[in-house]
Amino acid sequence: MAHWIPLTIVTLYVISLFAVTWWARRLTARGIGGIVGYLLAGRGLPAGVAAALLAGLAVGGASTIGVAERAYQAGFSAGWYNAAWAFGALVMGLVAAKRYRRFELTTLPELFERYYSTGARVIGVVGQLVLQVVITALQYVAGGAILSSLMPGIFTFRTGMAVTAVVFVGITLIGGFWAAGLTNVINVFVIYLGIILAAVLTVGNLGGFGALADQIPAGHPGFDLLAVGTGLIVGWFIVMLTTVHSTQSVIQIGFATKNERAASRAYLIGSALIFPVGFISAILGIAAAVLHPGIIAAEALPRVVLGLSPLAAGIILAGLWAADVSTASALLIGSATLVSSDIIKRFFAPDLSAAKDQLICRVTVFVLSVFTFLLALTVSGILRMLLIGLTLTTSYTLIVLMTMFWPAVCRRSSATWTLITTMGALVVWLVMPAGWRFLPHPIYFTWIVSLVTFFIVAAVDKRRIMI
């Protein structure tokens, strides 16, 4: 009986998402057609909806399950992961969002061809797809873990992954970017309701924060803000500052806003929404270390929730799952935009009608969802895998910011060579024996390679870009 209460709550949550999605479908149908209408909401998202979309994208499985997993071992300092995300969004809103919106782009690789070369666009698409496919696969993993851990009598890990896929793929297929945005308004509310309720009830059951601190196992860092290491924390901030400026699914939110002012406000509001989630999740990871010593770290948050009443567990489950669904929807939209705009329309079918354009977009979403689901079956270590994948964004960020703010040093081959060498640097890092790694995170290595390559090209290639 206990399992049916959470299942009922989650079912009602899913029904509300699909109701909003079906209504959002009308906005997509009556607006601008084609890719812009379906995958960019007709460039009509208001700042509040775009902010919810950004927060939903940022606060996924890594920000809840993943942070609690790390906090189970490293304590409160794991919460800096989300603080880094918020910092990246803040800088984007203050510095670059208006400029991005002014370009009237559909994808980031489109900018590379506009100012650099067709080859740069192709390489850019490959890197972006690899990055987004990895992150999307992680959302299946997190969704399966949530449902199977909290309702083991109903879901296995794989059926939990499958149900997660059906929900966010269905939302994306039916309603496009408008649906992703409007459902994320619900998702962000449910996320906060769930994790705050979990933290309040769990800490309350332990006797308050003081009692929680007194019961932390010997050797556990507890509420030490620097326990994960200053080098890693700084690395997270560099990763997220880089990611926000150069990942298709993130910057596409700005592309889809009504105007430059709405783009800037969306990232600023989103930053405030993102910041607290990581530290709240970290508290739950610490509580798991007190209540359940010796478990697998990935089970930290689900095991804490299982100790609460079925009603509370159901609300919390919906919140955790909302975090996962919200991220996956935006990622699928971003990946589909890359394939549809930068590959199919650019090289194979440039003159598609609006109706056929949207059909291609929907087919792309479906194919990508199947591929990422299969990839998810091989993934482990949510936060570690995510942070490694995000290091690919260094070259994108460098190229874009130089194009915007220092075009005089940009050369026609800058994008191609910077992208290639940075991708190669990440491969070298991954195959390098751990004892040879002299830096605390691959982001440092890829940034060094990106910068060195960019300025060598600036010195050798005399062909300036025209902007």
Image: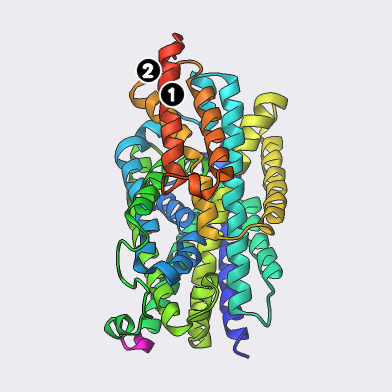
**Residue range corresponding to the magenta coloring:** 204-208
Say which element carries label 2.
helix
Q: Position of residue 72 (x, y in %)?
A: 44, 72
Q: Viewer-proximal residue, 238 or 89?
A: 238
Dominant secondary structure (helix, strand or loop) of the stretch shown in magenta:
helix
Image quarter (top left, top right, bottom left or bottom right) of the C terminus: top left
Say which element carries label 1.
helix
Is residue 451 located in the magenta-colored stretch of the structure? no
The answer to whether residue 40 is above or below residue 322 is above
Name which residue lies at 54% across and 69% down.
Answer: 298
Give amino acid for label 2.
Val
Q: Viewer-proximal residue, 341 or 224?
A: 224
Question: Which residue is under mark 2?
Answer: 409
The answer to whether residue 59 is above or below residue 5 is above
Mark 2 and 1 residues: CB-CB less than 8 Å, in contact? Answer: yes
Q: Viewer-proximal residue, 204 or 329?
A: 204
Residue at the left extreme, as displayed: 210
Instruction: Decide: few, some or many residues near mark 2? Use Cα within 10 Å; few <14, some 14-19, many ≥20.
Output: some
Nearer-N-terminus badge (2/1): 2
Question: Which residue is under mark 1?
Answer: 454
Q: Position of residue 146 (x, y in %)?
A: 58, 71
Q: Residue 23 appears in which quarter of the rendering? A: bottom right
